[in-house]
Image (cartoon, rainbow, N blue to C red):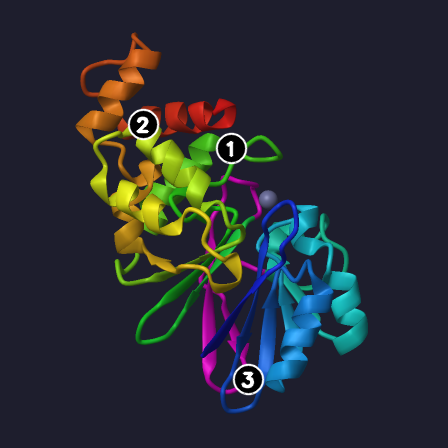
Amino acid sequence: MLVKQIWTGNAYRNFNYLIACAETGEALAIDPLDHVKCLQAAKDEGWSITQILNTHEHHDHTGGNEAVVRATGARVLAHKNAAGKIAGVSRGLSAGDVVKVGKTVELEALDTPGHTLCHICLKSHTDRPALFSGDTLFNAGAGNCHNGGDVGELYETFSQQLAKLDPATLVYPGHDYIANNLRFTLDREPDNRRAEQMLGKLAGQDPSRAYVSTLEVEMQVNTFFRLTSPSVIAKLREVFPDLSDAPDARTVFTKLRQLRNDW
Ligand SMILES: [Zn+2]
């Protein structure tokens, strides 16, 4: 499996991706908003884009579909319930469906609601798995829920699906928000040394050669996986004095998501 992360350089800080089969050169484009850069990257690599996967229906993920389809004839794949929200979807995906790219690449669809209610993450069937996480999981952060989402669903996705994946899984998110997210982690958990070190190294990184984290790293620096941390809970109680001594994880997640919105 060949992976090319494409930095759009736009105001929303989107990452687009090409995933290709090394044997056939067939490629799948994930959320190819910057169609010019995606088509050029495929050309440079000698790859042909045969499929587009939209992680979800927001325009900053689907806005490049039309141009890529026109140039390549690629099929559009998305969550089965996104078909009415994204033009030209020819394959609707459910949890566990496998997307093949060329002869050698298999990507498994995870049904990951929360940021929106029809959001797909892709997990590669490779020796070392990779997760293309759209706007569900960011480096050191979680997607917002204020544009068609649901924070309870996002909590379920994090706790019941993402937290159970192989810790070695590489994380490829839909946006570069790492520096701001690490600052939020440190605001919530000032004694998180790992987050402090990462921020020192990655603030001002060149997103065209972005750091790629793993789920193991996310468990250490991503507040939304650190719901039982005594520091996280103590700081949260400063803002929400009614919070109990041992709040349940769903409550902590919900409050953190709420704080992140205003932060
Ligand atoms: Zn989105």
Amino acid at the residue labelled 2: Arg
Quarter-wise, where is residue 205 in the image?
A: bottom left
Residue at left offset 59%, top offset 78%: 27
Amino acid at the residue labelled 3: Gly
Mark 3 closeness class: few <14, some 14–19, many ≥20 residues within 10 Å: some
Disc 3 on helix, strand or loop?
A: loop
Q: Between residues 195 and 138, which one lies in front from this camera angle? A: 195
Residue 250 visible in rendering = yes
**Which percent across, then down, holds residue 22?**
49, 87
Residue at left offset 49%, top offset 40%: 143
Q: Between residues 40 and 78, which one lies in front from this camera angle? A: 40
Residue hosting label 2: 188
Sequence order check: which comes first, mark 1 or mark 2?
1
Determine whether 205 is above or below 256 in the image. Answer: below
Sequence order check: which comes first, mark 1 or mark 3?
3
C-alpha span from label 1 to label 3: 35 Å
Mark 1 closeness class: few <14, some 14–19, many ≥20 residues within 10 Å: some
Residue hosting label 1: 150
Disc 1 on helix, strand or loop?
A: loop
Mark 1 vs mark 2, foreground winner is 2
**Which percent across, then down, holds residue 115?**
53, 40
Residue hosting label 3: 102
Residue at left offset 79%, top offset 66%: 67
Q: Between residues 254 and 4, which one lies in front from this camera angle? A: 4
Q: Which residues are magenta?
A: 93-118
